[in-house]
Amino acid sequence: MLNAKMELIAEKIVKGFGHFLVLKNISFKVSSGSAIAITGPNGSGKTTLVKILCNLMAPTRGQVVYQNNSQKINREDIFQYIGLVGPYLQLYQELSAQENIDFFARMRNLKNYSARVKQLMELFNLSGREHDSVKTYSSGMQQRLKYVCALIHEPDVLFVDEPRSNLDQAGIEAVYSILQEQKKDKILVISTNDQEDLTLADQIIRVGVA
Amino acid sequence: MKQIWLIFLKDVQQEFKTRYAINAIMLFAIVTLSAVSFSIGAYTATTRVLAALFWIILFFSSMSGLSHIFIREEETQTADTLKLVARPSSIYLGKFFFNLVLLVLLEVILIPLFIAIMNFKVVSFQIFLLTMFIGNFGLAGGGTMVAAIISKASTKGALFTVLSFPILLPVLISGISATRKAAESVKLMDAQNELQALLAYGIIIIVASILLFDFVWNE
């Protein structure tokens, strides 16, 4: 998937829950080699927008289009191109870290991924704990493991909801190195209210702001 | 196909470590069978009554475990994680095959116990085993779909049985009738209508579930 020009296009996204309209006509376009940040007050719909962009939730109106070299990607195949880290995405607690990694890698049709996993586990300081059950991990370690699982397939579009959530300084530095690398030739989408995180973005979408 | 197999394997791995669903259905089956056997006592029930009792035990035992496959994903907040990496049809079929295996395991224990304790005499094992084999597809197919629907509700446990009953009623009616014929007749042709009904129901419920699952599973 490297060297492909990816485009993520949001067209007039509207999302309502009952009578409450959370997102009103959100439109933007982002291409490989750039980063976009979604920001706004609590309850403004940042996570809802991320979920819609990742195909986890359907918008009330509007559409999300993924293009690879100007070819529209089928909705059912989007998962091959994206990675998401968010506080609402959990790993399988009963399984070990390695079993979680193997599951997500094989679901994405990866075959030779052990070198990539080794590199990521070292970066996130999880080496040596691969065979431990995830339920024995601290919340910070689980957050690090979520990054490993989201990055194994080197996604063309990486979504990160609250990048610093549960991480210590070393974890934040590891995440920042990944995010900087991602925005060089791929697409990075961050949902955050942190001013430092916003400096990573080339484009800022403010939701819930009149 | 690969995704279906991987989801099935992942669920087997999880079940192997927690043994929640298998323990629930086995204990329910054994307790219910014991209760029924004590209630009947020395009274010799007709094949019609025994066939009905067998399917009632099978239905309620399976109801205690089949829903777990989706409830676990929602309660542990892994549903979105799974949605992110799998096609909806693969999720349904992976979970369906897991529930199918769970039902077969239940029957491996329940059938010999029921025959021994309730003195249920099967004349045609061909009809009986075909009934169980085809009936499992309908039970697992419908049960898996209802499990996906109720996993998003707040009162999951009670809703599953209540919603499943009308949906799985055709399996119960045909299953009871075919099981009665297995105890009364040796000719496969005698149970042809029931077996055809079970087969048709199984195919319809599985195909409809694959087509509709995307709408149920995605918010």
Image: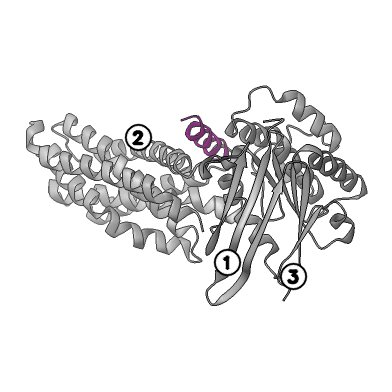
Q: Within 10 angstroms of label 1, few (less than 14), some, or many (20 or more) residues?
A: many
Q: Which residue is at a point 56% across and 55% down the rendered structure image? A: B74
- Is residue A54 at least partly visible in the picture? yes
Q: Who's the residue at 42% across and 63% down the image? A: B158
Please, what is the three-letter code of the amino acid marked with disc 3?
A: Asn
Q: Mark 2 or mark 1, which is nearer to you?
A: 1
Q: Which amino acid does label 1 sit on?
A: Lys
Residue at point 66%, 51% (across, down): A89
In primary-sequence order, the first of circles 3 and 1 is 1
Inspect the magenta stretch and tell me whether residue B161 lies in it: no
The disc numbered 2 marks a residue on which chain?
B
* Location of residue A176 in the rendering, given as x and y in whole percent from the top left corner: 87, 45
| Bounds of the magenta segment | B1-15
**Left or right: A70 in relation to A36:** left
Have a look at marks 3 and 2 and say if they share a chain. no
Give the chain letter at badge 3: A
Q: What is the x, y in percent for residue B135?
A: 26, 41
Label annotation for residue A42? 3
Which numbered mark, 3 or 2, is in the foreground of this view? Answer: 3
Report whether B89 appears left or right of A143: left
Q: Is mark 2 on a helix, strand or loop?
A: helix
From the image, tell me which residue sits under label 1: A15
Q: Is residue B148 visible in this depiction of the protein?
A: no
- The crowd level at tag 3 (other Cα within 10 Å; few <14, some 14-19, many 20+) is few
Q: Which residue is drawn at 73% across and 32% down?
A: A131
Among the 4 quarters of the image, the one containing residue A91: top right
Please state which of the two labelled residues, at mark 3 or mark 1, is closer to the viewer.
1
- Tell whether position B10 is magenta: yes
Residue named by callout 2: B108
Marks 2/1 same chain: no
Callout 2 touching callout 1 (CB < 8 Å): no
